[in-house]
Structures are given as C-alpha cells and as structure tokens.
Amino acid sequence: MHPEIPRNPGLPFAALTSDEERRLVDNLAFITIAKGHVIYTQEISRVTQIYIIVWGRLSYRFTRGTATLLSGTLSTNDIFGGLSVLFNDHMAIHTLVALEECRCLVLDKDLFTDLCRCNPDFFDYFALRLGRAMKDKTFADVLARRKLDRSLNLPFFNQPVSAIFRANIATCAEDATIREAARKMTRQKANAILVKSKSKQIKGIVSDSDLRSRVVAKNLPLSTPVSDIFSAPLITISSDAQVFEAFLTMVSKDKRHLAVTGNAGDISGIISEKDLIDAQSRSTFLLIKSVRAAKGMKDLDNIHARLEQMLLDPIGNGANADYITRLITTFSDAIIDRVITFALERSGPPPCRFVFLTMGSEGRGEQTLISDQDNAIVFEDMEDEGEAKAAKAFFDTLSKRICSMLDRAGYRFCDGNNMAQNPDWCQPLGVWKSYFKRWIRAASPEDLLHSSIFFDFRPTWGQISLAEELKSFLLAAIGGWSGFLRNMTENAIYFKPPLGLFGKFMVETKGEYKDALDIKLSMLPIVDFSRIYALQNGIPQTNTLTRLFRLYTRHALTSREYTDIV
C-alpha cells in the first residue's frame, strides 16, 4: 500500500505529470519522529531527504552563537528540506526539532532534485517560497552570508573533519598490557589505541609517541597495563566540524590526536596531527607546531617574517578576515608562550603569581600582519615592603627580557612604549586598579588614550585569575561613574573617516605602504563603538565581533543593527 500524496491547494504536487506522480508515490516512505528529536542542525547537517508533515508540529530556528535570529513552527502539510537542497548546497538552513511526536512522508533528495529539473512548475513552487522568504532581510542576510562564507573559506581548512580522519579504531581494555596494545596497533596499522574501562567507556588514548616517551625511553616492562601510560581526558571533535577547528583544538590543547564523534556522540575514528600534515603538507599547522617545539630563541629568530608566507595560501584563496586573524592570534600566542618560558629559564622562578597581558588589537584577537607590541605585566600584591620591592625588581628585569625576545622574534617595539618593559606597565594588581580608577575619573585626553589601549586586555600567560579580578574591578568602576563613557563617546565621534574630496578614499602618501588604504584605521569607529557599549553593559570579552554578539544577545542591539554591522 503506497502512501497518499497530500492534495491540499497550495502544495506543488498538482503540477506533476501522472508518470512523475507514480515515481513520487513509489518512493515515498512514512516515518515517525519522536518528540524532541533534532532532525537537522543548522549549517552542520547535510539534508538528504525532503519531509512532508502528515501530522504533528516541528520548530525551526536559525541561530548565531546563542542568539536566535529566526524561528517558527511547521505543521500538517508543510514541506521542509527543499530550500536547503536547492539553494544552500544541501546544508541545513535551520535547526529543526520535533515539538511532539510527528508523522512524515519522506522523499530522497536525488529524486526530488530530478523532479525539479524535469518539471519547472514543481521547481517554481520552491523558488517562489525562497523569494517570499528573501523579503525578510534577516533571512536574506543569513543565506547571503552563508554563500559568501562558503566562497571565501580556504578549501582545505573548510572541509569537514570526516573528509580526512582515520575511521580505523583500535581499542583495548584498561587492564591490557602494553605488549597487547602495541600488537593490536600493529595489526590494525593504527598510530593510536583507545583504552576502554570495564563498562566499555573510553577512558583515554595511547599513541605511538606515548610508547616511545613513556615505555621505551623509561625502559618500562611490556607487561605493564596500559592504564599506567594512557593520556586522559580524551579530547573529541565532531565529524561535521571544520578541519580548521580540529587544527585549533590540537594547538590550544597541545594534543596530537582527537577522537572524532558522530551525530549520536559515539566515537567513529581518530584524527591526528599526521593526518593534517599529510593532507596539507605546506600548512599553518607546521609553522605553529615548529614554534611550540622551539628549544631556544635561535629557533624563533625573526619567525614573524614567516607568518606572511604562511598566510599566502589562505589569503590567495580568499579566506575570510575572521579566519586570518584567528590564525595570527594562535601564532602570536604560541610565540609568547615560548618566549616567556625561555625568559623564566634565565630569570629563575618568579617570587609571586603574575599574568602577562596583551592589549590593543592583539588583546582583542584582531592582530594583523603589521603589529607592534602592546603588553603589560600584572603581579600579585605583597604585604611585606621588602618583598614587594624585590618582586618589582624581578618583574622589571623579566619584562625587559620578554620584550627584547619578542622583538627578536619579529614583534617590533611599540612606538608609544606601551609595553611591559616600561616600568609603569609592570606593576602589582593594586597599582593597576589605581591606574584604571584614575583614568576613569579624570578622563583626560591621555587617560582616554590609555583606556582605549589598556582596557582591551587579554591574559596570554600566567595566572588568569589576576586578569579576571582586574576586569571585574574595571567593569564595576565604570558602572559607578557614567561620565567616563560619555567622555569616551565624545572622544570617539571626533574620528574622521578616511575620505577626501568627492568621497574618495584617502590612502598613504609615502613610505612602504604608499597608495594603500589603512583598513585598521578605517575600522576604528566599529571597534570604539563595541568597546563603549560592552563596557556599559558589563561585557568582559574584548574581541569586537564577540562584543557585538553579546550586545545583541542582551538586546542592546536589534537583529537588524547586529547584522548590518557584522
């Protein structure tokens, strides 16, 4: 018994010929969808079927971060999936969730697209639906941005993890011996093995490098259980995630292997740094890994110069700005990590807790290829006067060493001397609080300049809690003195856009960048806007896009304002 095609007016099936209708009926199937089931996830799920709701209700929503930009309900006789297949490269435009148990007819996407190709009237139904939807500016922006992002992203890093990961999973029990685990890895030609508990839960992973560093190098008996050497916790990544996310996860977590999970959360394979290297031998991954593996400053000499070469491929392929700045930030953070490690090896252990802050564009995670140093050191307050003086002397010496090493790595000194090696910007927490309070209360032109640089700080090394305490103090101090934001706003509106006579852009008139437009300067009004409103709303994040998104989620920006700016 074949399912019946809905005959309601307004549906596209009346446009089908008898042969097309027969093909459709022969290939329709009934399915039941449980309440709460997520059918498609926006921008992640590939749409493989077209759904016709027989009864029940589904919710659809389009989100950006945690903000819902579009939402609604589908019910009996509504069709979904068609627009995603025809106009969004089979990627789900919305997230769809069953509000109750639903009964649906489903049609395979290949037959659906064939019917659209052969029957213009059938196709027109979906084209008209798209046209009506595009009258909603938010929906139009969403689809346009999806197509733009897809066209601008770097092919290698934009592909899903599923395209390059190893589906070959080797597993062993936690009480298995190292010998048994190694033999199983050899048989399955795997470079890592997952360790399972007695309840079959994955507890950790043992890799080739673990066998070398923890077994061979330490002459550990091969009868030792793998539970003594495995690495935990196991870091996972979705098979639908971009390779770029896998790359950043490996770098930030300092892991060589990630477990790949499917839609149900089950582990379907492993992706390793070797997979990334093999797939993209001339990659940013190699350069950042070389930074992290540096044994001394000679390995980092002028390494920043290699950053431009590293970005030639992504820029040449039109990678978007967010992608580029995140790569630059990851690269810079890796260098700072090694530099401070080397500096401490020479200076000895610090006398108290401290945190190294980056500020300005680097503090916002928006650093460009041409960036100088903007940094500071905050160390904890010490009650004993002698200990406090000794700590100040130690960190003054350490900061000079760090800034000199960063200059050696290719990060030039700041022309305004806004660096930790300036004794004014290497201070205990209490002094920094007094600085911030004075800048907020006095709000002189120099204070406002300092605020625009120092208030965009980000902890990159050391005790994050010190930075968090300083950030909390800053937001509370601003909340208690509204006049500061007024002064900051008045200062911001004096900015003149780089436009000359007849509306033409003003470019550099001399030097290395003659006839070039300073994009960083041009974006200053948006950076200032997001900073002022973020401080007003108690938002601690510093990245401009993140600030704008947080403002949107707090209803400080409307949906249209947010999408127009972003």
Image (cartoon, rainbow, N blue to C red):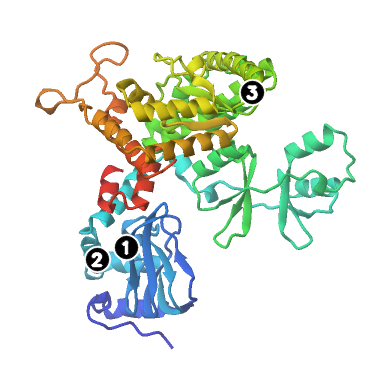
Q: Position of residue 145 (x, y in %)?
A: 31, 48
Residue on which the image places disc 3: 341
Left or right: 448 with respect to 300?
left
Q: Amino acid at mark 2?
A: Arg
Q: In which quarter of the view is residue 43 placed?
A: bottom left
Q: Are marks 2 and 3 in contact (CB under 8 Å)?
A: no
> Could you say which disc has been placed on residue 508 in the image?
none
Looking at marks 2 and 3 on the same chain, the residue that comes earlier in the sequence is marked by 2
| Residue drawn at (90%, 46%) of the image | 223
Cα distance, mark 1 to mark 3? 53 Å
Q: Are marks 1 and 2 in contact (CB under 8 Å)?
A: yes
Question: Can you see residue 271?
Answer: yes
Left or right: 220 with respect to 33?
right
| Residue drawn at (74%, 61%) of the image | 200
**In this rendering, is residue 18 above or below 173?**
below
Mark 1 Cα shell of 10 Å, populated few (<14), some (14-19), many (≥20):
many
Q: Nearer the viewer, residue 148 or 326?
A: 326
Q: Nearer the viewer, residue 262 or 168?
A: 262
Q: In which quarter of the view is residue 495 placed?
A: top left
**In this rendering, is residue 109 above or below 355?**
below
Q: Position of residue 64 (x, y in %)?
A: 38, 52
Residue located farthest toward the left when viewing the structure as drawn: 502
Residue on which the image places disc 2: 129
Q: Nearer the viewer, residue 458 or 33?
A: 458
> Could you say which disc has been placed on residue 83 in the image?
1
Q: Nearer the viewer, mark 1 or mark 3?
A: 3
**In this rendering, is residue 134 above or below 430?**
below
Q: Amino acid at mark 1?
A: Leu
Secondary structure of the residue carrying numbered label 2: helix
